[in-house]
Amino acid sequence: KLKEIKDYKVEEVIEQIYNIVSNYKKYSYQGFGYLFSDYNKSWGNFLQDEVLYSKKEIENVSFEKVDKSLKIIDKYKREKYLIHGDFGVHNFLFNNNSLYVIDPMGVVGDYLYDFYFAIFSSPLIFSKVGLDYILSFFDDDLEYKKALLVVVLYIRMSRAFKYDKDNFVIYLELYNQL
Protein backbone atom coordinates (compact mmCIF):
# COMPACT_ATOMS: atom_id res chain seq x y z
CA LYS A 1 0.00 0.00 0.00
CA LEU A 2 1.17 3.53 -0.77
CA LYS A 3 1.91 4.56 2.79
CA GLU A 4 4.09 1.48 3.22
CA ILE A 5 6.52 2.72 0.55
CA LYS A 6 7.74 5.21 3.16
CA ASP A 7 8.94 2.22 5.20
CA TYR A 8 11.27 1.04 2.40
CA LYS A 9 14.32 2.46 0.74
CA VAL A 10 13.24 3.83 -2.62
CA GLU A 11 16.15 2.12 -4.36
CA GLU A 12 14.92 -1.24 -3.02
CA VAL A 13 11.40 -0.56 -4.33
CA ILE A 14 12.80 0.42 -7.75
CA GLU A 15 14.95 -2.71 -7.76
CA GLN A 16 11.86 -4.84 -7.12
CA ILE A 17 9.99 -3.01 -9.89
CA TYR A 18 12.95 -3.69 -12.18
CA ASN A 19 13.02 -7.38 -11.23
CA ILE A 20 9.34 -7.78 -12.06
CA VAL A 21 9.50 -5.90 -15.36
CA SER A 22 12.73 -7.53 -16.51
CA ASN A 23 10.99 -10.90 -16.32
CA TYR A 24 8.16 -9.97 -18.65
CA LYS A 25 7.68 -12.35 -21.55
CA LYS A 26 7.44 -11.52 -25.23
CA TYR A 27 3.92 -11.79 -26.57
CA SER A 28 2.73 -12.60 -30.06
CA TYR A 29 -0.08 -10.26 -31.06
CA GLN A 30 -1.17 -8.29 -34.13
CA GLY A 31 -0.37 -4.89 -32.72
CA PHE A 32 0.23 -2.88 -29.57
CA GLY A 33 -2.31 -1.66 -27.05
CA TYR A 34 -5.05 -2.93 -24.79
CA LEU A 35 -5.70 -6.64 -25.24
CA PHE A 36 -8.62 -7.43 -27.49
CA SER A 37 -9.29 -3.83 -28.48
CA ASP A 38 -6.25 -2.24 -30.17
CA TYR A 39 -5.48 -4.96 -32.68
CA ASN A 40 -3.32 -3.23 -35.27
CA LYS A 41 -1.79 -0.18 -33.63
CA SER A 42 1.90 0.52 -33.71
CA TRP A 43 3.65 1.24 -30.42
CA GLY A 44 3.86 4.91 -31.37
CA ASN A 45 0.14 5.05 -32.21
CA PHE A 46 -0.79 3.52 -28.88
CA LEU A 47 1.36 6.04 -27.01
CA GLN A 48 0.00 8.91 -29.08
CA ASP A 49 -3.56 7.91 -28.18
CA GLU A 50 -2.63 7.74 -24.49
CA VAL A 51 -0.97 11.16 -24.67
CA LEU A 52 -3.89 12.78 -26.52
CA TYR A 53 -6.28 11.42 -23.91
CA SER A 54 -4.00 12.80 -21.17
CA LYS A 55 -3.70 16.17 -22.88
CA LYS A 56 -7.37 16.89 -22.19
CA GLU A 57 -6.59 17.18 -18.48
CA ILE A 58 -3.49 19.38 -18.79
CA GLU A 59 -4.03 21.53 -21.87
CA ASN A 60 -1.96 24.39 -20.43
CA VAL A 61 1.20 22.26 -20.12
CA SER A 62 3.62 22.53 -23.03
CA PHE A 63 3.18 19.69 -25.48
CA GLU A 64 6.36 20.32 -27.48
CA LYS A 65 8.55 17.88 -25.47
CA VAL A 66 6.00 15.11 -25.76
CA ASP A 67 5.52 15.64 -29.48
CA LYS A 68 9.27 15.52 -30.05
CA SER A 69 9.54 12.39 -27.89
CA LEU A 70 6.77 10.62 -29.81
CA LYS A 71 8.66 11.26 -33.05
CA ILE A 72 11.81 9.77 -31.54
CA ILE A 73 9.89 6.70 -30.32
CA ASP A 74 8.53 6.14 -33.84
CA LYS A 75 12.10 5.59 -35.08
CA TYR A 76 12.51 2.48 -32.91
CA LYS A 77 11.13 -0.98 -33.52
CA ARG A 78 10.06 -2.49 -30.21
CA GLU A 79 9.34 -6.07 -29.22
CA LYS A 80 5.86 -6.85 -27.94
CA TYR A 81 5.50 -7.86 -24.30
CA LEU A 82 2.44 -8.59 -22.22
CA ILE A 83 2.63 -5.77 -19.67
CA HIS A 84 0.52 -4.74 -16.69
CA GLY A 85 -0.69 -1.48 -18.22
CA ASP A 86 -1.49 0.23 -14.91
CA PHE A 87 1.68 -0.59 -13.01
CA GLY A 88 1.87 1.74 -10.05
CA VAL A 89 1.68 2.20 -6.30
CA HIS A 90 -2.11 2.02 -6.31
CA ASN A 91 -1.69 -1.61 -7.44
CA PHE A 92 1.25 -2.50 -5.18
CA LEU A 93 1.04 -4.63 -2.07
CA PHE A 94 3.98 -5.12 0.26
CA ASN A 95 4.42 -8.23 2.37
CA ASN A 96 7.60 -9.32 4.17
CA ASN A 97 9.71 -6.79 2.25
CA SER A 98 8.41 -8.09 -1.08
CA LEU A 99 6.45 -6.17 -3.67
CA TYR A 100 3.36 -7.78 -5.17
CA VAL A 101 1.29 -6.33 -8.00
CA ILE A 102 -2.46 -6.65 -8.50
CA ASP A 103 -5.14 -5.60 -11.00
CA PRO A 104 -3.44 -5.79 -14.43
CA MET A 105 -5.12 -4.11 -17.39
CA GLY A 106 -3.53 -6.35 -20.01
CA VAL A 107 -1.59 -4.32 -22.54
CA VAL A 108 0.73 -5.41 -25.32
CA GLY A 109 3.61 -2.98 -25.14
CA ASP A 110 7.16 -2.20 -24.20
CA TYR A 111 8.34 -3.39 -20.78
CA LEU A 112 10.05 -0.02 -20.23
CA TYR A 113 6.63 1.63 -20.27
CA ASP A 114 5.61 -0.33 -17.17
CA PHE A 115 8.95 0.37 -15.48
CA TYR A 116 8.61 4.14 -15.93
CA PHE A 117 4.87 4.04 -15.26
CA ALA A 118 5.54 2.47 -11.86
CA ILE A 119 8.35 4.85 -10.92
CA PHE A 120 6.30 7.90 -11.89
CA SER A 121 3.20 6.63 -10.12
CA SER A 122 4.21 8.46 -6.95
CA PRO A 123 6.48 11.33 -5.98
CA LEU A 124 7.43 9.14 -3.01
CA ILE A 125 9.44 7.14 -5.54
CA PHE A 126 10.68 9.45 -8.30
CA SER A 127 11.45 12.50 -6.16
CA LYS A 128 13.97 10.52 -4.11
CA VAL A 129 16.22 9.52 -7.02
CA GLY A 130 17.63 11.35 -10.01
CA LEU A 131 16.72 10.83 -13.63
CA ASP A 132 20.18 9.41 -14.33
CA TYR A 133 19.49 6.68 -11.80
CA ILE A 134 16.11 5.87 -13.39
CA LEU A 135 17.66 5.83 -16.86
CA SER A 136 20.47 3.52 -15.72
CA PHE A 137 18.15 0.51 -15.74
CA PHE A 138 17.99 -1.62 -18.89
CA ASP A 139 20.42 -1.54 -21.80
CA ASP A 140 18.09 0.05 -24.32
CA ASP A 141 19.12 3.04 -26.42
CA LEU A 142 19.38 6.15 -24.23
CA GLU A 143 17.60 8.37 -26.77
CA TYR A 144 14.63 5.99 -26.76
CA LYS A 145 14.61 5.67 -22.95
CA LYS A 146 14.60 9.45 -22.50
CA ALA A 147 11.81 9.88 -25.03
CA LEU A 148 9.65 7.21 -23.41
CA LEU A 149 10.34 8.67 -19.98
CA VAL A 150 9.01 12.06 -21.15
CA VAL A 151 5.87 10.46 -22.58
CA VAL A 152 5.17 8.40 -19.45
CA LEU A 153 5.82 11.37 -17.17
CA TYR A 154 3.35 13.43 -19.20
CA ILE A 155 0.69 10.70 -18.90
CA ARG A 156 1.32 10.35 -15.17
CA MET A 157 1.25 14.13 -14.74
CA SER A 158 -2.21 14.18 -16.30
CA ARG A 159 -3.40 11.51 -13.89
CA ALA A 160 -1.92 13.42 -10.97
CA PHE A 161 -3.85 16.50 -12.10
CA LYS A 162 -7.05 14.47 -12.13
CA TYR A 163 -6.60 12.24 -9.06
CA ASP A 164 -3.79 13.72 -6.94
CA LYS A 165 -3.84 17.51 -7.33
CA ASP A 166 -1.73 17.99 -4.20
CA ASN A 167 1.23 16.39 -5.99
CA PHE A 168 0.62 17.75 -9.49
CA VAL A 169 3.14 20.55 -9.01
CA ILE A 170 5.89 18.01 -8.27
CA TYR A 171 5.22 16.31 -11.61
CA LEU A 172 5.08 19.64 -13.40
CA GLU A 173 8.38 20.80 -11.90
CA LEU A 174 10.14 17.63 -13.04
CA TYR A 175 8.56 17.84 -16.50
CA ASN A 176 9.70 21.45 -16.88
CA GLN A 177 13.27 20.44 -15.99
CA LEU A 178 13.47 17.97 -18.88
Image: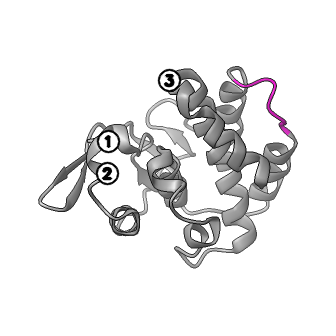
Residue carrying label 2: 5
Label 3 – label 1 distance at C-alpha? 14 Å
Q: Which of marks 3 and 1 is nearer the N terminus?
A: 1
**At 32% from the left edge and 65% from the top edge, which residue is drawn?**
16
Q: Which residue lies furthest to the left in this view?
A: 96
Instruction: Name the secondary structure under disc 1.
Output: helix
What is the magenta segment's predominant secondary structure?
loop
- The range drawn in magenta is 58-63
Q: Is residue 59 magenta?
A: yes
Residue closer to the observer: 172 or 117: 172
Instruction: Name the secondary structure under disc 3.
Output: helix
Residue closer to the observer: 74 or 41: 74
> Which numbered disc covers residue 163?
3
> Which numbered disc covers residue 2?
1
> Which numbered disc covers residue 121?
none
The answer to whether the residues at label 3 and label 2 have Cβ atoms under 8 Å apart is no
Q: Where does the image place residue 24, in percent across and percent down from the top left?
A: 37, 62
